Image: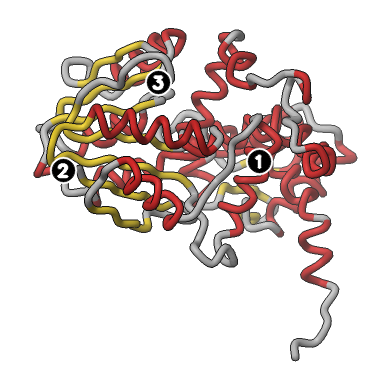
């Protein structure tokens, strides 16, 4: 029998200390500043407007957390923070951390209330059933949310662009496309693919700017519509990344059925998120994402690969499989 240990309990129980240290560093753009050139303590303190009482402990905490290096009194980004947390680089994935800092961190303070009531705890609290309507009504908040979706999805998007047998297909539509990073990565890696992003009209200008920045305006287009109210655009491959988990079971089944109707014969449906392992014991990130859906949505939840394959087969897909992507993310594929 394993000996009782307090260190694991305390590390998790006080894990918000490390989390908020990183989130504040992203908020004040520390890593972007150090990506320009390494700096010593007085220089960073002045340039970022830190108080002398806080600066040394803050920076050295980030060193201890392996998020900064310090050599001869000079602070440097690590290879990981330099690549992923410098806002000037196309590899920046800090958008999800920016959203975590502004929205998710305070919302999670209400987890106990969500566990006892089953009601969302987002911007409007339990009385506001439509979190997305609140987000989409504010252009700046919408931009931040869409950047966050790119941040959490970028690695998985690139894996899908590499892993899936795209040579067998000619067209793809990304449903609930956000900024469009999934269809952008697929189109960049597979020049023969004609791509489309499908989302609400407010997303269009943000999507088109992102596509243009990646040089794909001639090959990737935007189509506006609600995936509940309109048929999905027809394509060889329909993709939904971090979409199904936002909705309850009836809505999940509806979206899968609509995808089946939009896919050409022989085509494929790709669903991807932080798919929970079938035994529900290993993918802690996926399970906590499901708790996040409890807090953020009226009925959303994450699910296992077996769950999703079952729903796909109910909709008529003849073959299904699960493939790992990166980190906690996996994709479930259905063939029509």
Horizontal arrangement in the rendering, residue 35 relative to residue 180 (left or right): right
Name, please, the residue furthest toward the right.
53
**Residue 286 image position (x, y, % from top left):** 56, 52
**Disc 2, SS:** helix
Horizontal arrangement in the rendering, residue 132 relative to residue 194 (left or right): right
- Kindly identify which residue carries mark 1: 292
**Residue 299 image position (x, y, % from top left):** 62, 34
Marks 3 and 2 in Cβ contact (< 8 Å): no
Is residue 29 visible from the viewing direction of this image? no
Residue 227, numbered circle: 3
| Crowding near the residue tagged with mark 1, few <14, some 14–19, many ≥20 C-alpha atoms within 10 Å | many
**Disc 1, SS:** helix
- Kindly identify which residue carries mark 2: 166
**Residue 54 image position (x, y, % from top left):** 85, 40
Residue at x 67% of width, y 45% of height: 291
Quarter of the figure that contains the N terminus: bottom right
Upstream in sequence: badge 3 or badge 2: 2
Vertical side of 224 occupied by 87: above or below:
below
Residue 270, quarter of picture: top left
Residue at x 25% of width, y 22% of height: 196
């Amino acid at each position: 029998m394993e000996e009782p240990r307090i260190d694991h309990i305390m590390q998790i129980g006080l894990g918000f200390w490390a989390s908020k240290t990183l989130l504040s560093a992203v908020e004040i753009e520390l890593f972007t500043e150090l990506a320009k050139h390494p700096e010593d303590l007085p220089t960073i303190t002045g340039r970022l407007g830190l108080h002398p009482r806080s600066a040394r402990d803050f920076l050295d905490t980030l060193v201890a957390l392996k998020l900064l290096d310090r050599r001869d009194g000079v602070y440097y980004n690590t290879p990981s923070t330099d690549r992923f947390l410098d806002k000037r680089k196309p590899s920046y994935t800090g958008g999800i951390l920016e959203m975590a800092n502004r929205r998710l961190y305070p919302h999670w303070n209400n987890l106990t209330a969500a566990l006892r009531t089953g009601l969302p705890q987002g911007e409007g609290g339990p009385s506001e059933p439509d979190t997305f309507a609140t987000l989409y009504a504010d252009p700046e908040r919408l931009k931040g949310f869409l950047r966050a979706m790119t941040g959490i999805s970028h690695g998985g998007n690139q894996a899908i662009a590499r892993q899936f047998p795209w040579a067998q297909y000619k067209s793809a539509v990304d449903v609930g496309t956000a900024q469009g990073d999934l269809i952008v990565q697929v189109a960049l890696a597979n020049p023969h693919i004609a791509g489309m992003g499908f989302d609400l009209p407010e997303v269009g200008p943000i999507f088109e700017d992102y596509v243009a920045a990646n040089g794909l305006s001639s090959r990737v287009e935007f189509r506006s519509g609600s995936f509940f109210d309109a048929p999905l655009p027809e394509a060889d491959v329909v993709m939904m990344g971090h979409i199904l988990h936002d909705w309850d079971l009836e809505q999940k089944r509806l979206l899968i059925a609509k995808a089946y109707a939009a896919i050409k014969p022989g085509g494929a449906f790709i669903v991807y998120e932080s798919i929970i392992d079938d035994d529900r014991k290993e993918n802690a990130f996926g399970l906590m994402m499901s708790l996040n859906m409890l807090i953020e949505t009226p009925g959303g939840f994450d699910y296992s690969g077996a769950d999703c394959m079952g729903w796909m087969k109910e909709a008529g897909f003849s073959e299904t499989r699960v493939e790992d992507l990166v980190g906690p993310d996996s994709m479930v594929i259905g063939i029509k």
